[in-house]
Image: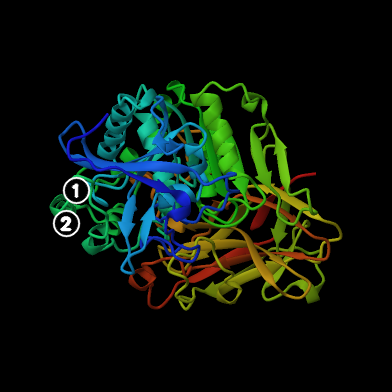
Amino acid sequence: MSFPGLRSVTVFLAGLVLVACSQEAPETVGSSSSEEAPQSVESSPAPSASPAFERSSLYVPVRDGTRLAMNIYRPVAQGEVVTTPMPVIFFFTPYRSRFQGEDGTITELAPAKSMGIMRMLDAGYTIAIADVRGKGASFGARRGFEDRTEAYDGYDLIQWLADQSWSNGVVGMAGCSYLGGSTVHVASTRPPALKAIFVGATDLDKYDFVRRGGITAQFNTRPDEPLSDDLMSLPMDADTDGSLLREAVAQHADNTPMAPLWYGMPFRDSISSLTGNAFWEEVGPYTYLEDLQDSGIPSYFWSNLKDEPTSQVILAAANLDSRLLIGPGSHCVPPPDYDLGGEIKRFFDFHLKNVDNGFDEDPRTTLWVENAPEGEHWRVGDFLPGEESETATWYLGSDNVMPEYAANNGSLGAVPGNTTQQQFTVSYDVGDGEYFAFWGEEQDENGLTYTSVPLAEDLHLEGYPITHLELSADRDYANIFVYLEEVAPGGEIEVLAMGRLAASYRGTAQAPYDTLGLPWHSGLQKDHQPLRPGQQVTMDIAMMPVSHIVPAGYRLRLNIAGADPRQRNLPDIQQDPPPELTVYLGGETGSRLSLPVLK
């Protein structure tokens, strides 16, 4: 199909100027199912030859008339655009699908390249990427982060793509971080043409992710980008003087600010003053779980161990009966020694092209095991992380630990100790932290620590550790952070898992989805329970999932703190004087740690 005034240009990937690994999109300093942009470098193995493509761009109106910016990449063979109708893989981004930096460098398809998606052009696919409403070169204002307006915008764009002459009517959708979230939300509207989704680092429950345990952390709480960032977007092809781009970006001034949106809703059922509704429920994919389950759209979820969305990704895979890939490393970074682009191709070939490639017979889960022997890092099978593990209880203040190993405050071991209690004063001097710290850093100097003896043999942890704290405070409000650490013989510390919970949000309830047996804190206003000063309460804190072999000779350590450097609003919420917290130890029901041990 041709469009009046649309200019097309044939581009070879080898000739593109791409951002280097250290040069991420301006929204990027480090995803989440969050508005943190994934890396833009393509890390998956490259195809045998650089694919050639023709790029074109235009505005596509959605149901309310708002025009959204769409860039389309069609394969070129022997110098000619391939005209055979083919499936389309669609990305929906807030990160400007195509923009020019101050140095003149043009960045294209940045969120997709990190997933090795360019090879799909050689595999008989068209790639399309659109800016969400209120971002990039699109018109309109964004009412809220991944709201239903955006979801139905995606529905309309998918059906538009399916109707084009160069499309065979079949569309897949993919993305990591925000793009993973937009993918799930669009899928929940059940577009008839959408036949499969490949999703990275997103959430099933937005409240439990952004405001986990009642506490906001880094994801989604940074200031919004200035309008000047969106003005760096390249105009659509027919917008020769950039006037439409300027008109579109002017409308972005009415976007709902993201950080105030999240900060302004302390409870799951809070009514946002900015959107006028219980917005957490609107943007929680589990709200549409039945639609997702009944849609028949196959899904594949991916994340990495040192990344907070991984906890939610596993739950999403559990509730949607999805394939699952958990790699090492940080946010949206393709796993090393793993052909992510090839896996995406096999997934879409099977579901969009009906290629009999054996994908349906592959095991459900591919899981990276940290510290595994060389060549044995990948554990593959029909399981979800933790399903095959046994629970081992380790007690804070255990009696079976020699004093020289009970570093700082106490011991950690398999035998409960005598009944006692320990106090600490919350320290807010925890450092500023990185602006995008996707994983926590040890806080041993800012709270209580409990350390085991050196392990006599390797300990394979797989699943979700849970910290059970018996605790009181000298006031009605306190935040608690826990960190499970590995301590090397030389003293080096690695944070393996972490969790957080505000004491007043400690009440558990039946979740509206499968939590794999983990404690679920509703966050509903009716379940909010302020402390009485000195009142001893039980806090069950599910930590991030772990897949890690703790080597013999290493020690385990649990750190308890009252503040974390990833709290962007820490200066606003710190109390003066700081809270005094008491941890109760001893006996079978004292403070303890449930570890998922794989035999």
Quadrant containing the C terminus in the rendered view = top right
Residue 262 percent location from the top left of the image? 32, 54
Name the residue furthest front: 78
Mark 1: secondary structure = loop
Q: CA distance from mark 1 to mark 2?
A: 7 Å
Mark 2: secondary structure = helix
- The 10 Å Cα crowd at callout 2, few under 14, some 14 to 19, many 20 or more, is some
User: Looking at the picture, does residue 126 appear above or below residue 413?
Assistant: above
Q: Is residue 257 left or right of residue 403?
A: left
Q: Residue at x 20, y 50 (%)?
A: 274
- Amino acid bearing label 2: Ala
Q: Residue at x 44, y 58 (%)?
A: 18
Which residue is label 1 attached to?
141
Q: How many marks?
A: 2
The image quadrant that residue 160 belongs to is top left
Which residue is label 2 attached to?
253
- Amino acid bearing label 1: Ala
Q: Residue at x 46, y 33 (%)?
A: 197
Q: Nearer the viewer, residue 512 or 115?
A: 115
Residue 580 percent location from the top left of the image? 49, 72
Residue 58 percent location from the top left of the image? 24, 41
- The 10 Å Cα crowd at callout 1, few under 14, some 14 to 19, many 20 or more, is many
User: Looking at the picture, does residue 281 appear above or below residue 473?
Assistant: above
